Image (tube, helix red, strand yellow):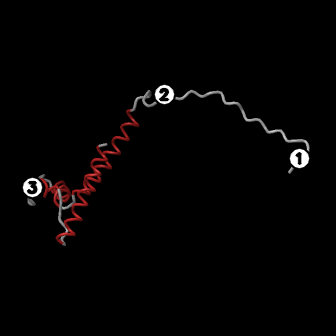
Amino acid sequence: MAAGISFLTALMLLATQLMLQGSTGNWPSITLASELDIPADRVFFDWAILNKPIQFIVSDVQLWIILVFAAGLIYWATDWTSERLGLPGEGPPPVPREEIPEPQAAARPADSPNL
């Protein structure tokens, strides 16, 4: 459910960007930094190897792309945990098998030719 909500929100953000581009002619940039008012020169970590990727994700990647990846991650995590942590008695009860008689060969009439 949460994955679907995240994916639907991403599609709504993409539609908003497309509508704004149609009205103004310029592609609007909706990122985490623009939505949360994070300044462009903000330093997240002192280590450059960690700061550069986070700076790229927060300031440059469109928010709808992040939400699509988050939806995929949420869906994968819920599927994986339900497979690994699911209880054995979970789900509907098994349907009992009834005795099904074996189909018998149809008898051929005596006057019909064998093909």
Is the residue under label 1 in contact with that under label 3 (CB below 8 Å)?
no
Rendered image quadrant of residue 76: top left
Q: Which residue is mark 2?
A: 93
Identity of the amino acid at label 1? Ser
- Image location of residue 3, percent across then percent down: 30, 46
Query: In the picture shown, does residue 49 fall above or below 2?
Result: below
Sequence-first tag of 2 and 1: 2
Q: Residue at x 33, y 42 (%)?
A: 77
- Image location of residue 51, percent across then percent down: 16, 55
Q: Residue at x 44, y 28 (%)?
A: 88
Q: What residue occupies the far right of the structure in this picture?
A: 111
Q: Which mark is residue 37?
A: 3
Is the residue under label 1 in contact with that under label 2 (CB below 8 Å)?
no
Spatial CA distance of label 3 from label 1 is 88 Å
Counting every numbered tag in the picture gives 3
Dot 3: few (<14), some (14–19), or many (≥20) neighbours within 10 Å? few
Rendered image quadrant of residue 102: top right
- Image location of residue 67, percent across then percent down: 26, 52
- Left/right of residue 98 with respect to residue 102 in the rendered view: left
Spatial CA distance of label 2 from label 1 is 49 Å
The foreground one among 8 and 57 is 8
